[in-house]
Image (cartoon, rainbow, N blue to C red):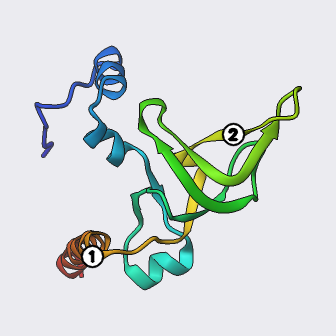
Amino acid sequence: MTVRNYGIASSRSKSRKAHFSAPSSQRRVLMSAPLSTELRQEKNVRSIPIRVGDYVTITRGSQKGREGKVTSSYRLKFVIYVDKVTRDKSNGQSVPIPISASNVVITKLHMDKDREDILARIAKGRETVQNKSA
C-alpha cells in the first residue's frame, strides 16, 4: 500500500521552486542539523532546527573538525555562521565563512522553554513509534 501526499510534487523543477521560494518558517525546518551521539541518546531526538547559541562541530568541507558557537543564521542563503570560523581578506579584514546547516553536528543546545517543549514533543513521538513497532 502506498501513501501519497498530494501536496508535495515529485517533479524536480517544482521541488526546487518550493525549496528556494520557501518562507522563513519553512527554511527554519530545512536548516535542521543532527545532534551528536551523546545528545541523541540523552534527548531521544535525532535532529533539530539549528539556532543562534548552539555549539556545533563542522563535519564536512575545508573547515572540517572546527568547533564553535553559532553566531548567526542566514535563512535567505540557507547558511549559518560559526564563531571563529573566518578567513582573512587581502586588506587584512576577517570575514565569517558561510557553513551549510547540513554540514554540522550540534554538540550543545541553547536551551529555553520553547526548545524544551519542542524536544519533549519530538521525543514523545519517537517513543510512540518505537512502542508500536515492538
Residue 29 shown left or right of residue 34 in the figure: left
Residue 4 location (% of width, % of height): 13, 37
Q: Residue furthest top?
A: 13
Residue 94 location (% of width, % of height): 78, 39
Residue 113 shown left or right of residue 46 in the figure: left
Q: Circle 2 sits on which residue?
A: 97
Is tag 2's residue or tag 1's residue first in the polypeptide sequence?
2
Q: Residue 2: which numbered mark, if any?
A: none
Residues under numbered marks 2 and 1 in contact, where contact means CB atoms less than 8 Å apart? no
Residue 95 location (% of width, % of height): 72, 37
Estimate the spatial distance between the alpha carbons at disc 2 and disc 1, rounded to whole Å: 31 Å
Q: Circle 1 sits on which residue?
A: 113
Residue at point 26%, 42% (across, down): 25
Q: Secondary structure at mark 1?
A: helix
Q: Residues within 10 Å of mark 2 (few under 14, many from 20)?
A: some
Residue at point 81%, 35% (across, down): 93
Identity, as a three-letter code, of the amino acid under mark 1: Lys
The image quarter in which residue 16 lies: top left
| Relative vertical location of residue 96 with respect to residue 8 in this rendering, above or below | below
For the C terminus, the quadrant is: bottom left
Residue at point 12%, 31% (across, down): 7
